[in-house]
Image (cartoon, grey):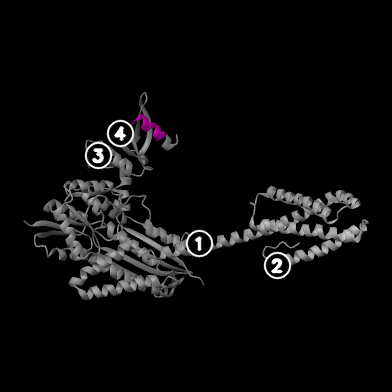
Amino acid sequence: MNTGLSYSFSKILLGFFCCWLLASALQAHVLHQFGLTWEISIKDGLVSNGLLSLVGLLTLNIYRFYQPGKSNRIYRFALGLAIAVFYIFILKYLLIYVIPNNADYLLFLQKSIYLRFIFAFLLIGFITLANWIQNNSNEQKEKEKKQADVEALLREAELSKLRQQLQPHFLFNSLNSINALIGTKPYEARQMVQQLSDFLRGTLKKDEQKVVPLKEEFEQLKLYLEIEKVRFGHRLKVEMNITEQSQSFLIPPLLLQPIVENAIKFGLYDTIGEIMITVISKTEPGYLIVEVQNPYDGSTQSANKGTGFGLSSIKRRLYLLYARNDLMTTHKTETVFTTTLKIPQSA
Amino acid sequence: MTKKIVIIDDEPLARSIVAEYLQTHPELELVAECNNGFEGVKAIMQHKPDLIFLDIQMPKINGFEMLEILDEKPPVIFTTAFDEFAIKAFEANAIDYLLKPFDKTRFDNALKKWKEQKTTEKEIAALIENTNKQPEEKNRIVVRNGSDIQIIPTSDIVYIEAYDDYVKIFTKDSYYLKKKTMSYYEETLDPAVFFRTHRSFIINLQQLTKIEPLEKNTFVVILKNGKKVPLSRTGYSKLKELLGI
């Protein structure tokens, strides 16, 4: 029996039609063996199988538009039973109507009615079962696909959100500095507009790429630091200590900048005087190591203070990219706060 | 008569733009430019300015904390780049503010508003009271003794005791006075760490060593430094619940 929901309806109809003719012929033959005339046998075969086909179609269509819940097996059973009863009821009157005034046939019909009922019920049960199995596996597949889609989407959204966390504070304060420079030092104002634009373009452009050489990431970082130096004047000093070898190692873009941003914020807002930010890069077998250090005042910080939002989002991003939680570590002494990044290099 | 102005901002260029805009107002005299809240407190106490331009995010103590420790709060125009919560608070308390970057017209409008209707100390006090704490403020309390400013990490607090209109904040080695209410600290300190044992006492739970009966139905808690702090009856049942005993 044809039960596939994926088949077109016309194919199902054709299938039913063929099955109907075949089953009718078979049934007519069997009935003839019981001693009924060919005419009655064929009429009975055609009518009962035709009706059975219709009932089968009805069942399929019910399930096509209405799927009881997965746990609702009793409901499916009851529905099958009801359809079978309905079939027998109609069949009896239909056969009496098609083959009227025949006492022998009426007797035969009464005797065979249970057999016909059981046959119809089994057939409907089979359709129900097949439909249920297919539906279940369809549902399962769909669920799995949906789950995978949702996960991929979430990951993508989260990653781009973490990457693009453009700091409005930074942007507006930079614009404010430019505004101040326009009046007194227009040349420097232009320079800063250029740096800010290059920096912003860099944050937007790197969106698609998965990893970039450290050298490229440092270029972006330098732009950022130049802008911050204009903002904070002589208070901010930066030292970069980069081994030649590490320059070509790969790093997810815009990963370093928020760490340095955090270091600057920490350093600038936690101390009064000049601050020195140190960036060190080196290599280990299979890893690129980057360290960022900033001054820190242990005496005015609560002992339980966390790493701040900036760093927790880096941790999250590293987890999304590498499924590891141990790639970023922080270390603090009374005066220095160090953030260390370990970036795996795929061979 | 000239009016005295103080600018407090940790970014030199941000100060310079305010100074530049002020040049067209000869009746206003710029008496001090400050890098941070510490310098700000000193300058305000020294000059008693008629108006200050104040940034929020600054080293060590932010603009709100600086205002809070001042006994006489001057009229203020806040200058800030981006601070959703602070801006909401300014609007709710009708406090003037300038969003960076701002042009001369906006600046002049703010001055005009200030001349017509100066923010009162009360309004500023209400602003500080009602503003959601900036994240960095949650872990520290800023106190002032004369011109000496101290930042106490909340983890250093042993207990707090009510003292008339003030509270005494006790650390291991010292105590500090602050004009605040007990209920203010009960609400703002981390409830997982600080507990109000009594109408007049809040303790740091990490300092708690034991609970002892004093008389019938009255109790005291004993802190690590040996200090006995009264525990009210409701405090006793709440504390028992909190500690799961």
Q: Amino acid at mark 1?
A: Ala
Q: CA distance from mark 4 to mark 3?
A: 12 Å
Q: Amino acid at mark 4?
A: Arg
* Image: magenta residue range: B229-240
Q: Nearer the viewer, mark 2 or mark 1?
A: 2
Tell me whether circle 4 and circle 2 mark residues in contact (CB < 8 Å): no
Judging depth in this view, the residue of B51 and B152 nearest the camera is: B51
Q: Chain of mark 1?
A: A
Q: Chain of mark 3?
A: B
Q: CA distance from mark 2 to mark 1?
A: 50 Å
Tell me whether circle 3 and circle 2 mark residues in contact (CB < 8 Å): no
Secondary structure category for the residue under label 3: strand
Q: Chain of mark 2?
A: A
Residue named by callout 1: A323
Residue named by callout 4: B199
For residue A18, side relative to residue B20 (left or right): right
Point out residue B192 in the picture as x, y percentages from the top left corner: 38, 43
Secondary structure category for the residue under label 2: helix
Tell me whether circle 4 and circle 1 mark residues in contact (CB < 8 Å): no
**Taking the image as drawn, is residue B142 in sight?**
no
Residue named by callout 2: A10
**Taking the image as drawn, is residue A134 in sight?**
yes
